[in-house]
Every structure is written in C-alpha cells, then in structure tokens.
Amino acid sequence: MTEGRPFLAVVARTQPVGWCAAFYTRVIQGDGMKIWVFSDLHLEFGVPFRTDPPNDVDVVVCAGDVLTRGITPSMKWLAENVARRIPVVFVAGNHEFYSSSIVDSLREVGQGAGFQNLHFL
C-alpha cells in the first residue's frame, strides 16, 4: 500500500483446541483490489477451517502451513476447497515439507499438478 491510499484491514484470530498454532486470516483492501490472506491452517491436526471467501474478495493469498507431507497435499486441498470459487496464490510454508523431500515436492509442482485457478510461488 502506498501512503495516502485507502486501506482497510479486518483481522480475525482463532485459537484451535490443543497445542497447535493459531491460524490467521485477514482481508486487505486497497487500490481497488480485495485480498483474503490466510496461513497456518495446520489441517493435519483436524481443526476445521471455513473456506467461504469473504464478500467481494478478488484473490486469496495462502501463506503456507496448510498440510504436511509435501506441497501437493496442500495444493490439492486449496484446489478442492478454495480455488473453485476464487483465484489462489500459494506460498509453501515450512510445514509443507515435513515428512517430505523439498526437492521432490518442488519437482512435483514444477511438473505441473494441473490445478485450475491455483498459482504456486
């Protein structure tokens, strides 16, 4: 955001039951685009995450730590639950590589997982 431009941020923090980290979700609006940003879902712990996008959101940025065991499980979950309704930009977190090879995960993504409306950075 540049100085003097309109900016709106709505922040919600939810603490799941148990010891796992909280997930974060934020809607950012500025310069005519509304972005839904979330991270640290840690779905491997069984804590549900509501995937209905907030109103009038143009794109989702998922900043990682969705699932473990490689990038592909996280991308598959995003494709099935979020990217059907709205474009998603995904950046893997450290948990995507737990119980997985970084090289193999990146190779899978490089070979094209065939997910529509989902972009990996």
Image: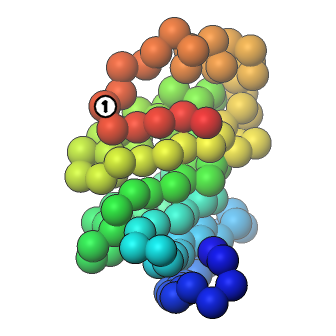
Q: Residues within 10 Å of mark 1 (few under 14, many from 20)?
A: few
The residue at the point 62 percent across, 27 percent down is 70
How many numbered tags mark residues here?
A: 1
Of all residues, the one furthest to the left in this rendering is: 85
Q: Is residue 103 visible?
A: yes
Q: Quick one: quadrant of the N terminus?
A: bottom right
Q: Is 69 above or below relative to 13?
A: above
The residue at the point 64 percent across, 20 percent down is 105
Instruction: Locate residue 77, reporting x and y percent.
Output: 40, 40
Q: Helix, strand, or loop for circle 1?
A: loop
Q: Is 35 above or below relative to 74?
A: below
The residue at the point 76 percent across, 42 percent down is 94
Q: Nearer the viewer, residue 91 or 41?
A: 91
Instruction: Locate residue 119, reporting x and y percent.
Output: 47, 36
Q: Is residue 45 visible?
A: no
Q: How is the image coloured?
A: rainbow
Left or right placement of residue 46 versus residue 20 in this view: left
Q: Quick one: quadrant of the C terminus?
A: top right
Instruction: Locate residue 78, reporting x and y percent.
Output: 41, 44
Residue hosting label 1: 116
Q: Is 72 above or below relative to 31?
A: above
The amino acid type found where label 1 is placed reads Gln
Instruction: Locate residue 34, reporting x and y percent.
Output: 41, 71
Question: Which of the 4 image quarters holds residue 110?
Answer: top right
The residue at the point 33 percent across, 38 percent down is 117
Of all residues, the one furthest to the front in this rendering is: 4
Question: Which of the 4 image quarters holds residue 3?
Answer: bottom right
